Image: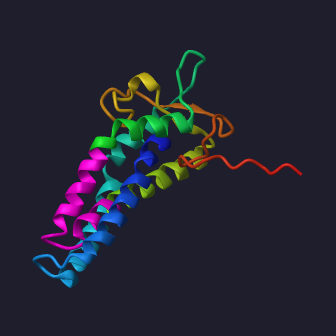
Amino acid sequence: MAVVVRAGAAPLWWLGVFAAGIGVLVPGLTGRRIGVLAGAALFIVAGAVVAYARRGRYTELIRSAARAGKHDVLQDRSVAVRNWRRGHRWWLLLAFLAALGSAFAVPAAGGLLLAGCGAGLWLKAAWLGRRERAESALLWVRVDWLDGRGGRPAGKAVKAYRSTGVAAGDAAPGGTRRRTAALV
């Protein structure tokens, strides 16, 4: 489940950093200094809002997690990430273009806002990873409960999470890739 949360972090972060880098090159209406300071404030606010949004719903779903049965359909990490990114590619493109367009008014602010959203998703995935480590169980969302774009792991359609042992699947707690021991 943390995989779905984490899936959007990298694209939002890198598109935001790229848009902010390009945005600094444009003088804009407010000037670079004000644009970068406003962007830094937006980065912090967006990161905090995204990281703390819907924590109550996540906590409620974590408490009601049931052991995954043999009829539950769970996805590998790579499939979940690919589905999320394919389902949201147009939204990511529109957000990137909006961040670039905003650079003509307030340089770098839109890009830093986008990067702050990505950082907030990473923080939320890290929080979920700490919860998974504390309970020694990976949390999963059934595939048929995700929306059509592969997202919304705490949406209305999700009734409860499923749990497995930490060795199940190809994801580690927090949605990162599982590191395998090197063969000697």
In this view, which residue lies farthest toward the left? 29
Report which quarter residue 59 is drawn in.
top left
- What colour-coding does the image apply? rainbow
Q: Write down the region rendered in magenta.
A: 91-115
Q: In this orientation, which residue lies closer to the viewer: 172 or 102?
A: 102
Q: Does any portion of residue 76 appear in the rendered image?
A: yes
Quick check: 155 above or below 68? below
Horizontal relation, residue 54 to residue 161: left or right: left
In this view, which residue lies farthest toward the top? 71
Name the residue: 48% across, 49% down: 128
Quick check: 113 above or below 144? below
Name the residue: 59% across, 43% down: 135
Residue 101 sits inside the magenta stretch: yes
Horizontal relation, residue 123 to residue 116: left or right: right
How far from the left and from the top, in percent, is residue 26? 21, 75
Dominant SS of magenta comes to helix
How far from the left and from the top, in percent, is residue 168? 66, 34
How far from the left and from the top, in percent, is residue 11? 40, 53
Q: In this orientation, which residue lies closer to the viewer: 120 or 129?
A: 120
In this view, which residue lies farthest toward the right? 184
Quick check: 150 above or below 29? above
Residue 89 sits inside the magenta stretch: no
How far from the left and from the top, in percent, is residue 172? 61, 46
Name the residue: 39% across, 37% down: 86
Name the residue: 33% across, 26% down: 157
Horizontal relation, residue 130 to residue 170: left or right: left
Total numbered labels = 0
Report which quarter residue 84 is drawn in.
top left
